[in-house]
Image (cartoon, grey):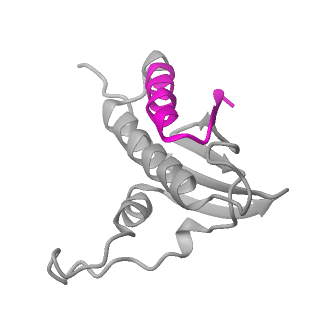
Amino acid sequence: MLIRLIVPGETARVEDLNTSLEAVLKRHGIDAGVRGDVRLIVEELASNAIAHGKVDGQPVGQHELSVNIGIDGDLLTLEFRDEGAPFDPMSVEAPDLDVDIMDRPIGGLGLYLIRQIAEETHYRRVDDANLLRVSLRMPAPETLP
């Protein structure tokens, strides 16, 4: 594991999480495109967990969000964990992209983008927490002649 970051489940903390992730990934020489993909994934998953993950009787922001990042060869893996209501984001149907955007229901596009970006995704429920693993393939470093 490269790093684990934990923040309260509050909208205001999502940017803090992304800022920390960006600094760590940049320090480890991760490509700007991959860093952008990580930002999109974390913003989408954290925002969904905060907006929709409230457990009955639990105050907003009471649960934690954590992201573990690991690198193995050319795969960067994000392991996103939240203690909200059970939800498998990969079970959401893909939006119908052929429908005019004004006629399309709200929601699902961010999760669709994650599935397009990811090399692999895997969801499971563990100890009253949602655990989503998203793996991204990193480009080979460019070599100078």
Residue 143: say if magenta: no
Quadrant of the image containing the N terminus:
top right
Q: Is residue 23 left or right of residue 79?
A: left
Measured as percent of width and height from the top left, residue 82 is found at 67, 50
Quarter of the rendering containing residue 122: bottom right
Total numbered labels placed on residues in the image: 0
Quadrant of the image containing the C terminus:
top left
Depth order, front residue of 94/117: 94
Quarter of the rendering containing residue 117: bottom left
Q: Is residue 30 left or right of residue 50?
A: left
Q: Is residue 70 left or right of residue 40?
A: right
Residue 22: say if magenta: yes
Q: Residue at x 38, y 46 (%)?
A: 40
Q: Is residue 40 above or below residue 111?
A: above
Quarter of the rendering containing residue 56: bottom right
The magenta region covers 1-25
Q: Is residue 139 visible?
A: no
Q: Is residue 79 visible?
A: yes
Measured as percent of width and height from the top left, residue 23 is found at 46, 19
